[in-house]
Amino acid sequence: MGRIVGIDLGTTNSLVAYTDPQTGAPKCIPGPNGSTLCPSVVSLDPDGSIIVGEPARRRLLTQSERSIYSVKRLMGRGVADIQTELKLFPFRIDPSSKNVIRIKLGDKFFTPPEISAFILRELKNWAEAYFGDTVDRAVVTVPAYFNDAQRQATKDAGKIAGLEVLRLVNEPTAAALAYGLHEKQRGRVAVYDLGGGTFDISVLKLISTSEGDIYQVLSTNGDTHLGGDDIDNLMQSVVREKILQHHRVDVSTQPELAQELRKALIATKHQLSDSKSATLRFPLPNGSIFAHEFSRAEFDALIGPIVDRTMGPVKQALADAHLTPSEIEEVVLVGGTTRTPLIRTTVQEYFGRKPHTELNPDEVVALGAAVQANILDRGVQNMLLLDVTPLSLGIETYGGAVAKVIPRNSTIPASAQEMYTTGVDNQTGIDIHVLQGERELAKDCRSLARFTLKVPPAPAGLPRIEVRFLIDANGILQVAAKDLRNGQQHSVEVQPSYGISDTEIERMLEDSIEYAEQDFAERQVIEARTESEAILAATQKALTSASSATLSTEERATIDQSVAALKESVAGNDYKLIRKRIDELNHATTHLAELVMNGAVSTALEGRKLAEV
Amino acid sequence: MDRTENRMSTPSTAPERIDHFTLFDLPRKLWIEMSGLEQKFLQLSWKLHPDNFVNASAEEQERSLKRSSEVNDAYRVLRDPVARVEYLLEIEGARKEGEHKQQAPPELLEEVFELNESLDELREAKESGGDLAALKSRLESAQKNFQEKLGEVDERLQVAAQQWDAAVEAKAGDNDRKAIMVRLNELLNRRSYIRNLVNNVAKELA
């Protein structure tokens, strides 16, 4: 048996973490470039290799038709569900997709779970390189408000990636675990989790008993179409409009330019978290520069509606927990987007207390997943997680109404039994349609699955089949049926409304193994060499440019030494050494980069490396 | 898919095997001490939660799944005073929903009629863009009125529940118990009807 890890499969970034057996403390595992963040971006190179993470993010700018980001927005959804997304994101969808979306990368098609599986495999590789040991099991997090199909898709992704997913954990609950361990806090806690594409609010009770600590979720609510991406898209629409007006350039017709703009806007957005204003300077293809200063006030006004949208679920979650804001003793902020000042002040005002931000909002979910992984793996006996299902489970009845059988916020596992019989003589099938949601009509709820109970012909009302609907600890529905007349298990063939069949998953697993066969270490060497080529070329160019005139002889000598060391390492196969030499050269050329920058007009450049100038 | 009404069957609840009261070691009485119930729930959860059985055999996992869902289901029902009464009546075979669910209790007939009229007027005014203020305020006072009635039903439900518990303690005969259950059943139906009214008004006023 290999190792177990905790994975945060995020919309914007994904992370992998483990629990140190010595200290019992969770830790995020860094990737080859030293960062613990793996951008949730996947790219298909022309030679057929799959690229994930930071290198794939760069390819968004150069090969946008072969790359994809924010695939989490497509998980467990059908084409009809993502019409808004299609307007705002450059997803290229196979038009014949219906209930399982097929995305085009280059000339190939992939389903969202397959793409997520590439990300999971990448993180698996990071962990295996770190441990020097195989990793075969994981706890993977999902938004608390994810429905059954979205959860199933995530589990499928794990399977395709060659990981046994021991448990899906809700992201706010994972964050609470990480904080609970870290802060030793107890009492009523609200977790406000705003990520790249999803929003969750969970209300928990943390209890200490003689047996150990209990993390009990009281209620959860959210919006799976709401996140930092929406802020980016708002900024995009404002800026694109201005660019069209003032410069007659239509960004929407140029995919790579759009990605450049998106990247620049994200940098501007981040700056606005720390400053009262930030200026976007964006070079256009015709040579002119588009400049726009965002004031904090303007930015707040722009994103106000998004922040307001989060408060509806917050109020509902408190109501469902029968609590008022002042009865919440601790508030925790999770997700990169919660760095936005307007969100911090809004949350603080609403709850009347300062939220916790001590743990890195990007890492805290992965850390919590690692804690849960540890609990499951080592049978830790002093922590208990009691989570809930976010949506009511219902069955369609006469006239298209819905009868709720398991209410939302029921502690899971949860079940309900319903007895079925026939309405007419010799009826041979009883149709059952299962849904999730709070509305009263089936058409307004989320179709989960349909199935038909087969019965031998008999007078109406004679057959008695008891169906048990069970929501397991992952929040996923299981169905079992029993014929009450003979006590036998009745077979049930459930047709999920949005999902991939088991045979298709097997096929995808085989395909993904083929992709994975390109050796991880080999690929790291290729990537490192590519990066070193870029920095060597940039260094060369800078050294011969006018800006380098003021360099001292010592600096030049150091740079030359670093260049020689890097060239030597590139000739070898040790990717860690190549990266070390790249870092050294970056360090040696910091001053040179500034000199070049001062001579150039470009987008906000503080902290940029020479290769990016 | 053919969804003619004949093929859709009406679900009805089947009786449980291990009833919720037994699972929590409680007598079939309607008053339950809440913190004791919670303690028992947490104790059972520690033992049975699927997280404890992740490395166990498939059978043990299946059993833990089943048993922990039983505990959660039972706790969910027992901690809600109204669901508790409903459940008790079900396992005693005494739960009969109102035959004509939409029919108002006789003494409320006139008020319900007025309320429905006001609701219709409000809906029409919303569509035709008429003056909503007066209509809304009339509905708001009707809502208040019915909320009070809901409170009254809850009080009477509590009294009847106490009578049931007393009867259990006194080991009263079948007829006495049946009579109390009939009363509880009536009150539940009445409560359900009034609550629907209150919800409908709240929806229109929102």
Image (cartoon, helix red, strand yellow):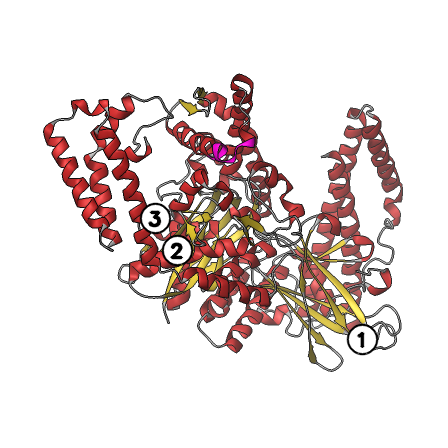
Residue B121, quarter of picture:
top right
Q: Please provide percent x and percent y for residue A279.
A: 41, 22
Residue that badge 1 annotates:
A463
The stretch in magenta equals A253-259
Quarter of the image with the N terminus of chain B in it: bottom right
Residue that badge 3 annotates:
A36
Q: Is residue B162 in sight in this rendering?
A: no
Chain of the residue where label 2 is placed in the rendered structure = A
For the residues labelled 2 and 3, the Cα–Cα distance comes to 10 Å
Q: Which residue is drawn at 25% across and 52% down?
A: A576
For the residues labelled 1 and 2, the Cα–Cα distance comes to 51 Å
Quarter of the image with the C terminus of chain B in it: top right
Q: Nearer the viewer, residue A319 or A355?
A: A355
Residue A419 drawn above or below residue A316: below
Give neighbour class at mark 1: few <14, some 14-19, many 20+ (Cα, 10 Å). Answer: many
**Residue B107 magenta-highlighted:** no
